[in-house]
Amino acid sequence: MIVKEKIMTIITSLFRVLFGGLMIFASIAYFLNLMPSPPLEGNMKAFTEGLDAAGYLMPLVKGIELACGILFVFNRFVALAALLILPVVVNILAIHLFMAPEGLPVAMFLFVANMILIVNNLGSYKGILVVK
């Protein structure tokens, strides 16, 4: 049983660090404009233009990604970061499911990694999951 727990700890740590690294990379690439945007068409173009028109939304999302990525990599407040990043990850998954399927493998990894971190920290959520 001890070996199984150690293996799960290693797997969870691997997912946490990879997930955090991807979040950090994506946010830094956005803020420093390191990656050119591919030409977009149709619904994806309209969606992206809407996000840009809001002005504040993408910097907010990328700031949350950066903060959560740092917390994941340094193994601090992981339970909080996993909940904070969940709406972002669900939206990334939905975008790739419905508008840009070429990014689906990465979106699925982000979702699975987020779920692993949430399940691994389920005990931390007892206070907010209590029915009164």
Image (cartoon, rainbow, N blue to C red):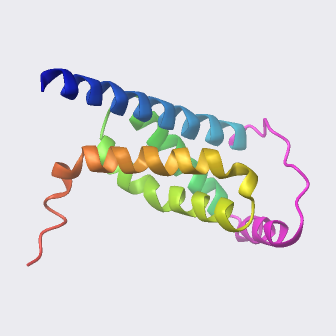
> Any magenta on residue 118?
no
Residue closer to the observer: 117 or 68: 117
Examine the rendering and report whether any part of residue 94 can be seen.
yes
Decide which of 63, 115 is in the foreground and name it. Answer: 115
Asked if residue 98 is positioned above or below residue 23 in the image, the reply reads: below
Q: Quadrant of residue 2?
A: top left
Residue occupying image coordinates x 75% and y 51%? 102
Q: Residue 63: horizontal and vertical position, in percent?
A: 55, 48
Q: Residue at x 76, y 70 (%)?
A: 47
Tell me how many marks there are.
Answer: 0
Q: Quadrant of residue 60?
A: bottom right
Work out which quarter of the rendered image holds the N terminus and state it: top left
Q: Is residue 27 above or below residue 55?
A: above
Whether 53 is among the magenta residues is yes
Q: Position of residue 48 (x, y in %)?
A: 77, 64
Residue at image x 34%, y 44%? 117
Residue numbers of the magenta segment: 31-56
Q: Position of residue 35 (x, y in %)?
A: 80, 38
